[in-house]
């Protein structure tokens, strides 16, 4: 359930896909560990996010407080995060890298 100990990807070709701390913002959707997350808080060294797994009932995402658990991402977890939460997956980004 938690995003801990994810494999990090530093870059994909010329485009960096790893999110830096400054790129996180409240309500921004990201991809991590094969799941979509929405940032709910940004601290000085960590971010907090909710997992977007309950699309059948969007009221779970009304908050704070949220009906779903908030997870803390530290600097190591952030290395496994990429911008967006649509169909793009880490594997797709790596496959697009010709070098």
Image (tube, rainbow, N blue to C red):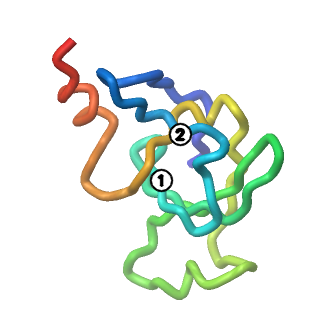
What residue is rendered at 39% in x and 44% in y? Answer: 34
Q: Earlier in the sequence, mark 1 or mark 2?
A: 2
Instruction: Tell me residue 55's x, y (percent).
Output: 39, 76
**Residue 11 figure quarter:** top left
Instruction: Tell me residue 97's x, y (percent).
Output: 22, 22
Few, some or many residues within 10 Å of mark 2 (<14, 14–19, 20+): some
What residue is rendered at 60% in x and 63% in y? Answer: 50
Label 2, secondary structure: give it.
loop
Q: Are marks 1 and 2 in contact (CB under 8 Å)?
A: yes
- Disc 2 target residue: 19
Q: CA distance from mark 1 to mark 2?
A: 9 Å
Farthest-out residue, right: 44
Label 1, secondary structure: give it.
strand
Few, some or many residues within 10 Å of mark 1 (<14, 14–19, 20+): many
Residue 95 lies, with reference to residue 56, above or below; the image says: above
Q: In the rendering, which numbered label is found on residue 30? A: 1
Farthest-out residue, top: 99
Residue 92 lies, with reference to residue 11, above or below; the image says: below
Number of callouts in the render?
2
Q: In the rendering, which numbered label is found on residue 41? A: none
Q: Determine whether, in the image, residue 19 is placed left or right of residue 89.
A: right
Closer-to-camera residue (51/27)? 27
Farthest-out residue, front: 14
What residue is rendered at 68% in x and 54% in y? Answer: 71
The mark closer to the camera, 1 or 2, is 2
Q: Determine whether, in the image, residue 3 is placed left or right of residue 93.
A: right
**Residue 20 figure quarter:** top right
What residue is rendered at 53% in x and 29% in y? Answer: 6
Residue 38 lies, with reference to residue 4, above or below; the image says: below
Instruction: Tell me residue 12's x, y (percent).
Output: 33, 24
Q: Determine whether, in the image, residue 45 is placed left or right of residue 31.
A: right
């Amino acid at each position: 359930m938690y995003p801990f100990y994810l494999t990090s990807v530093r870059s994909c070709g010329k485009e960096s896909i790893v999110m830096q701390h400054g790129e996180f913002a409240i309500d921004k959707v990201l991809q991590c560990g094969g799941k979509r997350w929405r940032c709910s808080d940004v601290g000085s060294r960590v971010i907090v996010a909710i997992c977007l797994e309950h699309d059948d009932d969007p009221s779970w995402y009304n908050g704070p407080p949220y009906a779903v658990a908030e997870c803390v991402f530290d600097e190591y977890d952030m290395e496994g995060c990429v911008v967006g939460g649509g169909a793009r997956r880490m594997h797709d980004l790596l496959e697009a890298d010709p070098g």
